[in-house]
Image (tube, grey):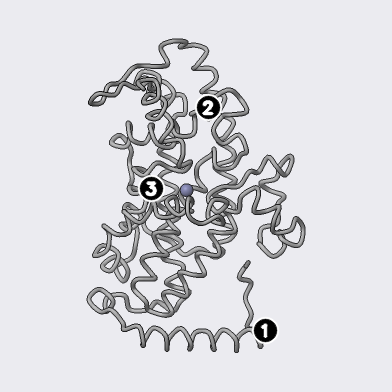
Amino acid sequence: MKHFQKILLITIPFLFFSWGFFAHQKINRLAVFTLPVEMIGFYKKNIQYISEASVNPDRRRYAIPEEAPRHYIDLDEYGDSAATKLPRYWKDAVAKYGEDSLTRHGIVPWHINRVYYQLKDAFLLKDPDRILRISADLGHYIADAHVPLHTTKNYDGQLSNQVGIHAFWESRLPELFFNEYDFFVGKAEYLENVQLASWNAVIGANAALDSVLRFERQLSLKMGHRKFNFETKGKQTAKVVSIEYARSYHQLLSGMVERQMRESVKMIGDVWYTAWVDAGQPDLKVLIDYKPTEEELILRREELKKWKEQRLSNPRAHETEGN
Ligand SMILES: [Zn+2]
């Protein structure tokens, strides 16, 4: 029984495979403070929700089969320099590889763009619940796209004898060192092209992957048995990576975790802001205390649908939505 408990404790965090709950909540929360004055009131009022709901997409993975591929992309499945060669837009990617194959290897860069359009629609509808729900989701996917191990099929070091590195990098390290990070990232800025920005995030994360794996391998050889400690919580004892090991690894990465978290925070603010601008900068202050009725929302959804149909029938006004 004792043995079983140990295994359980060590295994649980690895099941989530995305920034730990701690990091996701912090990242979404911090993104609120990048927003301009026209937006920040509404987001601050709902900051508790924005931060707690940041982990909803991970919770859905157990219930909804199409959820999992939205969190990663196994670039190495596509051969050398895939990060720069893969089609930027979903339609082109589907034409080249087919939807099944894309889904098998993960779709995070395209999914971010899709959710950006959903957020823009939510702003057009002035539906506060929808704005919040989609903003929180979007924050999650953007943050995931910044995790180096979310860009490889060797996502938990299982192919390089480094099992456990996933949760170590994205849960343990931010939990241990968060207080040493500087999160002043400046104000949210308008993105000309959210789809290309998503690719930039993935390319940046993938460029860091080699260091993530190599430094851990070197350190593990160097530190040997000092890699692990036994930690007791209540009646349970678990074998965990030692603080000494975590700190050494964190130092070798020279600010990588902080950098990836900062970039996540900044890009989330940027995409929220861009969606709001692209929806015509609706007045969010009125949404702080006002909730439209379901009838109003149905009416607005119909209007939006009609407007989109009209726009689609006029090809010159059509924009590439990438989905
Ligand atoms: Zn995730």
Q: Residue 320, relative to residue 191: is it above or below?
A: below
Bin the neighbour count of mark 1 within 10 Å (Cα to Cα): few under 14, some 14-19, many 20 and up.
Answer: few
Q: Earlier in the sequence, mark 1 or mark 2?
A: 2
Residue at the extreme right of the image, as rendered: 96
| Residue in the image at 37% along x and 76% along y | 127
Q: Report the Cα–Cα distance between label 2 and label 3.
A: 22 Å
| Residue in the image at 37% along x and 79% along y | 126
Q: Earlier in the sequence, mark 2 or mark 3?
A: 3
Proximity of marks 2 and 3: CB atoms separated by less than 8 Å:
no
Question: Which circle, 2 or 3, is nearer the viewer?
Answer: 2
Question: Which circle, 1 or 3, is nearer the viewer?
Answer: 3
- Where is mark 2, residue-wise? 163
Q: Is residue 159 left or right of residue 38?
A: right
From the top left corner, tell me how far across and down residue 161 is, in percent: 58, 22
Q: Nearer the viewer, residue 179 or 191?
A: 179
Proximity of marks 1 and 2: CB atoms separated by less than 8 Å:
no
Asked if ligand 1 lies within 8 A of label 3, the reply is: yes
Question: Which circle, 1 or 2, is nearer the viewer?
Answer: 2
Name the mark on residue 281.
Answer: none
Q: Nearer the viewer, residue 200 or 220?
A: 220
- Where is mark 3, residue-wise? 24
Q: Earlier in the sequence, mark 1 or mark 3?
A: 3
- At numbered mark 1, what does the secondary structure look like: helix, strand or loop? helix
Q: Residue 151, relative to residue 50: is it above or below?
A: above
Q: Amino acid at mark 3?
A: His
Residue at the extreme front of the image, as rendered: 1
- Where is mark 1, residue-wise? 316
Q: Amino acid at mark 1?
A: Arg
Q: Is residue 162 left or right of residue 259?
A: right
Q: Amino acid at mark 2?
A: Val
Bin the neighbour count of mark 2 within 10 Å (Cα to Cα): few under 14, some 14-19, many 20 and up.
Answer: some
